[in-house]
Image: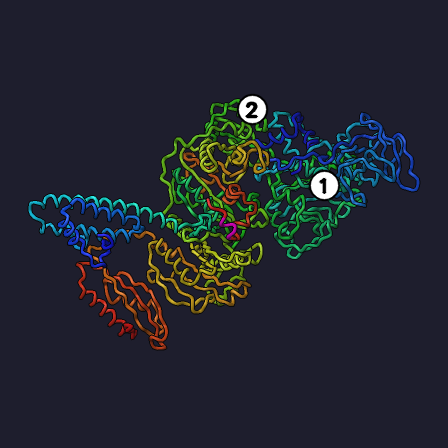
Amino acid sequence: MGGTAEYSSQSGFNPGRDFFYEFKEDNLMNEALEKIKQKILDGEAQLTNSKAVYEFKKSFLDSKTGKIGQLMKEMRNIPPEERAGYGKGVNELKEWANQFFSDIEEKIKEKELQLKYESEKIDVTMPAKTVETGNLHPITQMRNQLIDVFTGMGFEVYEGTEIENDYYNFTALNTPKDHPARDMQDTFYLSPEFLLRTQTSSGQIHVMESKKPPIKIISPGKVFRSDDDATHSPMFTQMEGLVVDENITLCDLQGMLDMFVKKIYGDGTKTRLRPSYFPFTEPSVEVDCSCFECGGKGCKLCKGTGWIEILGAGMVNKKVLENCGIDSEKYSGFAFGIGIERTAMLKYGINNIKLLFESDLRVLKQLDD
Amino acid sequence: MLVPLSWLKEYVDIEITPEELQEKLFSCGFEVEELYEVGKDISKVVVGLVKECEGIPDTHLSLCKVDAGEHGELQICCGADNVKAGGKYPLALVGATVYATAKDHKTVEGVMTIKKGKLRGYESFGMLCSGVELGVSENMFKGAGYNGLLVLPEDSQAGADVKPILGLDDWIFDIAITANRPDCQSILGIAREVAAVLQKELKMPSLDYTETGVKKDGFTVNVDAGDLCPRYIAHYVYDVKIAESPQWMKRRLALVGMDSISNVVDITNYVLKEIGQPMHAFDCNYLEGNAIRVRRAEEGEKIVTLDEQEYTLNANNLVICDGVKPVALAGVMGGLNSEIRDTTDAVMFESAKFARDNIRKTARALGKRSDASARYEKGVDEYSTVMAMKRALHLMEELGCGKVSSTHVEVNTGNSLEPKEMKVSIKKVNGVLGITVPDDEILRIMKSLDFAPSISGDELTLQIPAYREDMESYPDVAEEVIRMYGYDKVVPTFMPSAKVTMGGLNLRQKKELKLKKALCAIGAYECIHYSFFSPSDLDMLKYPEDAKERQAIRIMNPINEELSLMRTTLSASMVNAIARNMKRGNHEGRLFEVGNVFVADELPLKEYPDERETLCVGVFGENEDFFTLKGIAETVAETLCLTFEYEKAEKSFLHPYQTAAIKCENVEVGYLGKLAYDIQNSLGIRASMYIMEIDLKALSQWYDRKTMFTPLPKYPEEKRDLALVMDKNVTCGQVEECINKACKYVNSIKLFDIYEGEQIPEDKKSMAFTIEFTPKEEAFNAESVDGFVNKILKNLKKQMDIDLRS
């Protein structure tokens, strides 16, 4: 064998025949098989990639051209009495070679995988490739949160019109023409009859005119007052809530508000009612919630009082119910109005209401809740 | 409203601290917006007795040895001209805080802390003070106005704190009064509430006086406009001696921010603050015709008011006239012609109730407001009108500045000043509250409010004083009960008796939310802009004169012209917002707004206008172009389960060749395009922006379309690529339409390449499409798809002379 025992098929070497020759010459079958085995083992060091393994393996195990394959072919030339021994020896060699190559293949694959990984080494601290997503406006975010809380309690959402007539905005809400409460809200007029609604409370009337109790609605929307300075915007957003049913009391108002502040500001939040005045509710209250920043101990946000004013509310004035054709002897209700900008500004710590309407992307990008 | 604690104490015994009183007021509905000590900035100032005082040579200074009682004897340098041995003056010790004044010694420039000093080589361990330095005016303390040291009374103890002596230890409550309680717009009104909440007795101010037998014969009062003046009271006072008011009255007026003028004028102001009733005093010598007439002004009638301003009036204004001419603008200000002068020796006092709406309108229309008009606008009750006149006459007598005649004329429309009886069910009162307030508590509270209550079974009978015009029904009683009983006694419940309601969003609201979220997902930020805009915005967008966008609803009383029209398009706000962003260094972004545009059938408005919910999208930045915005339009369509079609269009403010109309179901629902360059330039921005507006109200008619599942195709789909050569002006849309019409199995058509150049004729372009065919009834075979392609090519050739590229 020696130098001629190249596994490369290009050498013109015929392994089956040569082996058979050697086998015949020496008649030492086992020794010959051992030699092939040794050739395989000797070749191992050069098997550095899967292609080399494939070629080397083929030179032994290919059923037509491989050395071991040819030994199998030679079977017919073996005298019948020796065939069994011959076949067994070759088969054992074949099995051994299969196992040998499969182990090598495994090893090489592992090594190659390792190399592939190494070649793909990156600096994980390099900048991310992002797909930018936008945000809802902070007012919409706040509004959606409120809507979620109240729709969960069985409220429907009614959106009224921004342009209202005097009757729905004032008169039906127990604010006749010479009423001092009209001064509380500087109104934009579009004609002697039509105006920009100064409060979403006007929605109460439309709902109560079209729907009979039980009524549970919230009415979010833009409202307008002729006020324009650092803390006032001529347009802002309110959310009115209204419940009308039998035996609704002030206790129910506070119970619902407690639920509401817990959901928005956290479980430990409490409410406090104090007397106030709105023409369309009687009694009327201002509602404070325990400061969600300091938990009521007193801080900068609550100006040391432990309480933050969050909304106005009250029992629906019976004149308002009657104006809408609802029997005030049978039904009662409560209403509340939340300033959404104020709630959002408190929550996000925004100090200037005007920022909300300037659409500066540097502002909008920050506020994602 | 400013309420000094010392004045309040005249009517109620208050033994709690100012802070405690603030809490009490807060709990019963009176928010104290500010509570401060009159001398809040002054500290460590004591009575100093000057024992020795020697001039320092060649200066205006004196070197004093001052006895400061427990603080020892101190050496003080003093520059005042009235310092002398034996005098007692306020001494600011080292570490004291007082007001720093400018060189004129009058203008306060801030608060300063006194330090040990050295003047001309002489050490000074403090400072002797003037009134200004302590924030004490002449009206607050006699002599405090002198431009030199404030001289303290002989009996002051050296070393004692000066604050009680000068009244600097008094407190001011700035109280917010709700609109339903005009009766509390006075010191006495607040005192009533304080008495009720502290369960103390209310000590009424003295109202007694003695009428002499003197009469002003033939004097008459006529009220022609009873609707605007339900009560008018005039009383004649003679032997009037105009002089200064006593110190106590000057001081009280000063504490509530009013200057002292003269005894008679001060009495009217004092009564306004004390009782809440504006009063006026006419100099009788200048009233002609021995008569007062209350009437509407004549068109063009003129009056010159006390402050020497002339006003031209009309029939909306109410005037007080003598027998000849207007002498006062009712409820707003007196006339110059009959003002109180030093020489006045006879006065006609007026106490009247005027309709608050009329006063408000007059004050607004003339741009003239006064303490009186402000008070009338809030509402004055006739009970106070009567009481105020008595109080003024009492004060005239008490101050000895005039004699009260027996000429008293009162014209009224018959409103009763007696308490009004009111009966309510206790069950209903408790029904509003949701708790049961014990009967004896209800009785106690009603009594403390002077409602003279009695209970019989479920019936509570009250006598409502005439000044409580807000008390109408049982909910009002419930409010009175709970604000005094305490809101902390309300027990939270959760509508135990209410019926279950479903709640939730309606279809339109759900779709809108879904749309907004989809837009956020593709990188757009929501913005909200004002519902009004500027006429100049319409010019900026070059809308032609007859454009419907110009038919905007005008606000009659806008804040300014920039905010005077209701929006007819959202695009102007969007363009401005993007321009603003670019100027602030934000160079790319996507913005959207969902808001209403307002479409009126008729102007001025006679009925509700159409508020059309509209979507506006604006994109800008290097990576944006017409087609990225069109992609957003497709997202809108897909999100709402609709199909949009696009046609080339024109818009006054958009690029003439990069603008499309958006159609849905053959209805035009919006547009998109690139902002025209001239507008971009006029905004001073360099980069391009793309604007889209879609009428969501129009789309909402299709929101209820049901989403239905289409079974997946049973047979494999087939694709063919076709490169087509056509005239340059043929549009992609036209080709697609033609392909679609040619074969019903076409499922999708995708343009994947455009070529213009050497390989095809000069006036042609090539567009390559991938067409996907979906089998319906049975699987395709090679011939069937070839057949479709042939049909498509035939149609393209016939209709648009389009060839297959060879």
Label 2: few (<14), some (14–19) or many (≥20) C-alpha neighbours in 10 Å = some
Residue B157: x percent and y percent? 81, 26
Q: Which mark is residue B368?
A: none
Task: Name the mark nearer the viewer: 1 or 2.
Answer: 1
Disc 1, SS:
loop
Determine which quarter of the picture holds residue B22: top right
Tell me the kind of residue under disc 1.
Answer: Met
Give the Cα distance between marks 1 and 2: 38 Å
**From the viewer's perspective, is residue B609 above or below residue B116?**
below
Residue B517: x percent and y percent? 40, 49
Q: Is residue B472 visible?
A: no
Tell me the kind of residue under disc 2.
Answer: Arg
Tag 2 or tag 1, which sits nearer the N-term? 1
**Furthest residue in direction bottom, as rendered:** B762
Chain identifier of the residue bearing label 1 in the image: B
Determine which quarter of the picture holds residue B166: top right
Q: Is residue A56 left or right of residue B252?
A: left
Magenta segment boundaries in residue numbering: A361-365
Residue A239: x percent and y percent? 47, 43
Disc 2, SS:
helix
Residue B468: x percent and y percent? 58, 34
Q: Which mark is residue B258?
A: 1
**From the viewer's perspective, is residue B374 above or below residue B748?**
above
Query: In terms of depth relative to the viewer, which is nearer, B733 or B806?
Result: B806
Label 1: few (<14), some (14–19) or many (≥20) C-alpha neighbours in 10 Å = some
Q: Is residue B68 visible?
A: yes
Coloration mode: rainbow
Q: Which mark is residue B444?
A: 2
Q: Is residue B261 left or right of residue A104?
A: right
Answer whether residue B66 is magenta in the image: no
Q: Are marks 1 and 2 in contact (CB under 8 Å)?
A: no
